[in-house]
Amino acid sequence: MDFHHSTSLTVYLLSILGYCAGQDALPSGPVNGTLGGNVIFKTTINPTTLFAISWTFGEPPVSVVDFVSSAGSVIGVGYVGRISLDNSTGSLELRKLTLIDSGTYRVSLRTADVIQVGSTSLIVYETISNVTLRANVIDLMELNDTVIFSCSVSSGSSPFSYRWLNGSSEVTARYGIQLGDGGRTLTIANVTRYDQGPYRCIVSNPVSSKPSQNLTLIISYGPENTTMKVTPLDVLYGSGSNLTLSCSAESSPSAQFQWLLNGTLLSNNGPELRLENIQANQSGSYSCWAHNTRTLRYQISEPSDITVLEPISGANITTTPNSSIIEGGSVNLTCDASGAIITREWMKDGHPLSAGGNIIISEDKRVLSINPVKRTDSGEYRCRVSNPISTANAKHGLIVNYGPDGMEIMGPSEIEVGQKITLTCSADSIPTSSYTWVLNGTEIPGHSPEFTKEKSEYSDSGDYTCTATNNVTGNKTSVVHKLSVKTEGSLSQGLSAGAIAGIVIGVLLVLGVAVGVAVYFMKIKGFFKKESSRSVGNSKSSANGGGPGGNQDLNYADITQFQKRDGGSVQLGNLGTSSTEYAQVRVNNRPGQPAEPPTYKSHHS
């Protein structure tokens, strides 16, 4: 047995028997090494002078290297060119590792007065390569299908650990997700659109880690959240406008789109519908229909009502009846126009008109009825029709025919012969009435409301009848006016009230003087004596119940003329009036008094 062999055997035996001053010359293991790589077994001692170092491997121990300070190093079989030894610490580097290098390594370190020993294990791993990710199915239906991923390694030393990623997020076991076969498989039940990936698996062992290639699932879903957008968005559109309807939906693969109007499919396909120069007959409820050819599902968007209005034109008012309107009858005014009419308003003579009294307005305000018609209903009627994009007005002048009524004749009741006659007849009437004149039953030619004659005659006296005729209403009304033609100069014209009063006073004075003179002459002639004797007889007769008694009123006497004794008469003249003036005479049955002519003073007392 050579020296080196005996040295390593001695060290080995001492380490087994515990004849040493120190343990744990190596840290606890194991030490992991990579196939083909290097590993260093570091001791726990600080650099010092070592007299002997011995490394062995396995059971029974096989010498790796022996070192004696006085003789140098001896490298074991199979380790030549693969090791390096630190003589100051005893650390060992082992290179070009092979799988059979895995095992237990021991070391013995001897200084001048102590021996330290230690052991550790080496595990040599092959690095992982060719990690492959597979799925049982790639094209799946959302909420219907389940996918199973499997991760495999073509080379590498176990044990393996597996880590799963969806994008950058780690996938862990939870509801609907299971990890199996030590983490080698991943199962996702009832996949959703958020499970599409990309997926990776990362396989690791103590010395290496390797990811797989990415794998992305195709998950079909939808359509969902199908929405329609109208551009430009408005409540109402005028005819001739251009609109664009766009439809979108959440769907994989992309949905196919069709368009519906009032629930009926249109021939248009695609996510966009262009409506150019749109007309009123294209108004309605639009919606889009989204269909997924993979899931065979479909969804219809919420409808959008598109209302197209034509501008209002040709506004007009028609009347029923269309003949002349007569007071007391009825009339309907109808307001119509071309285009979409949203509102109607009625006005009369510029003022808003509402229902009430004899005015009736239909619910849609198309027809305004007047019943019964009054003359005050005449005027200009206006109908205003409008929609949000336009306005139009129509007007109609309503003429209510009425009359004649309120007739009167203006003119004098007395004129002097030879003076001009002017009589004017008037009546309230629409249209203007025609007039006829009748004098004392005889029609006067002409139809003027005014009757004139330059020089009146006595034969012009009488009843003038004016008849007004309304040829539309068919009504006639007459009025009578009395005219008296007097003798020339018999009518005082143009006298003031003071002049008339003066004339009256003068006439009364003349009458008073005339009466006084008459009484005086009658007294001189004895007229009262004779009457006195008669009165006595009458008095007696009165006592018997006959004749007047007391103070009794007698009939009036005409005193405009007096009778002379010779049978002639005295004319007092024209007193300025056509009527006869009378004097009131009272008979006094008291005894007669001496007759004296009345004085001017007594006449007025």
Image: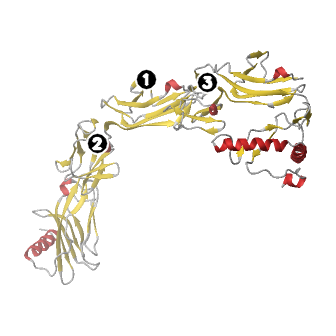
Work out how far the residue at label 3 is from the one at label 2, CA to CA, in angstroms.
83 Å
The quadrant of the rendering that contains the N terminus is bottom left
Circle number at residue 64: none
Q: Amino acid at mark 2?
A: Thr
The quadrant of the rendering that contains the C terminus is bottom right
Callout in the foreground (3, 2): 3
In the image, taking residue 448 as reference, residue 255 lies left or right, namely: left
Residue identifier under label 3 = 326
Residue 263 image position (x, y, % from top left): 38, 27
Say which quarter of the image contains residue 85: bottom left
Q: Amino acid at mark 1?
A: Leu
Circle number at residue 192: 2
In the image, is residue 507 above or below residue 141?
A: below
Q: Amino acid at mark 3?
A: Ile
Mark 2 residue element: loop
In the image, taking residue 308 as reference, residue 18 lies left or right, namely: left
